[in-house]
Image: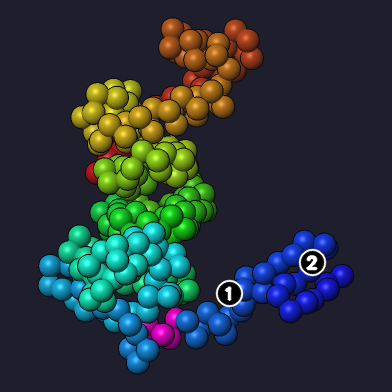
Amino acid sequence: MIAKNSSTEQLDGIPKPLGSTIKNDKRHQNSIAQLWKNPRFSDITILVGENKAEYTLHRNIICLNSVFFDAACKEGRFVEGYNQTIKLPEIDAPEFEVVIRWLYDEGYQLPSAVYGSDFALVYKAADFLGMSGLKQEMVKQFVAVLKLERGAMAPRRIASPLTVLSDVADIAPVSDWELLRKIADEGMAASFFTNDGLLKIASGELGSPLFGAVMLDAYQNYIRLNTCISCVFTAKDDPGGSCRVCNKDSSLVPRPRRTMLLE
């Protein structure tokens, strides 16, 4: 039973702000999305990239889901709060337009073909602007596509998931460990690599130290979930034998195979 009052909706005894109901209304989302294409009521200018591409936006919208914009737009804290202009030479226009669509309630859509550098640049922009929600949605869609494409024949939307992970790990903070692990866990199941490849990852020859740490942690978890401890040693010491505990043929034990690690 739903009971309503002037400020909240009551659902099974739990108050729910009306704002959240409005947020999920598609007509409301479409109205918000149209605002950034109409500069009539905009009140701040963003200059993006080295070419200073100009975007006229709305402070009350862009500050809601961006820690960076929320701080930069406060008067008395940064000069941007006074002159109503923010320069973002660190971000290019294609990535910033992905950011705008997210800020103006148009959501995020994983590209039809995902390449490491392109995905990483959007992720970097979201991280710089303090948009954790966008980063989470990017990883969520990326992992969902990997699961759908597991075992599928080419062409794939994500040809080299661990290359994408390596590029993202190059620019991601350590605090994004859990997000990176989600990519690594699913990317490992969809990829092939060699013992030599693992050694290169561990030594830092392939990717950043953060990439190496995430990959090795994910690999240890993969082995732990898919084999008993005896399987691991049997596969190493007696490749033609069977596990002394579970009797599994050691040739069936998940082990690194031919490389498809990084392009």
Per the image, the residue denoted by label 2 is: 11
Q: Is residue 2 above or below residue 247?
A: below
In this rendering, is residue 131 above or below 80? above
On the picture, is 20 further left or further right than 131?
Answer: right
Comparing 88 with 5, the one in front is 5
Q: Does the stretch in magenta take in 5? A: no
Is 48 displayed left or right of 137 in the figure? left
Q: How crowded is mark 1: few (under 14 residues within 10 Å), some or many (20 or more)?
A: few
Report the magenta residues as a range. 33-38
The residue under the point 62% across, 73% down is 19
Amino acid of disc 1: Lys
**How far across and how far down the image is residue 128, in percent?**
30, 55
Residue that carries the numbered disc 1 in the rendered image: 23
Please check the rendered image and state whether residue 34 is part of the magenta-colored stretch, yes or no: yes
Q: How far apart are marks 1 and 2 (CA)?
A: 17 Å
Does dot 1 land on a helix, a strand or a loop?
helix
Give the residue displayed 37% in from the left and 46% down from the top: 161
Q: The N terminus is located in which quarter?
A: bottom right
Query: Residue at left 29%, top 24%?
Result: 202
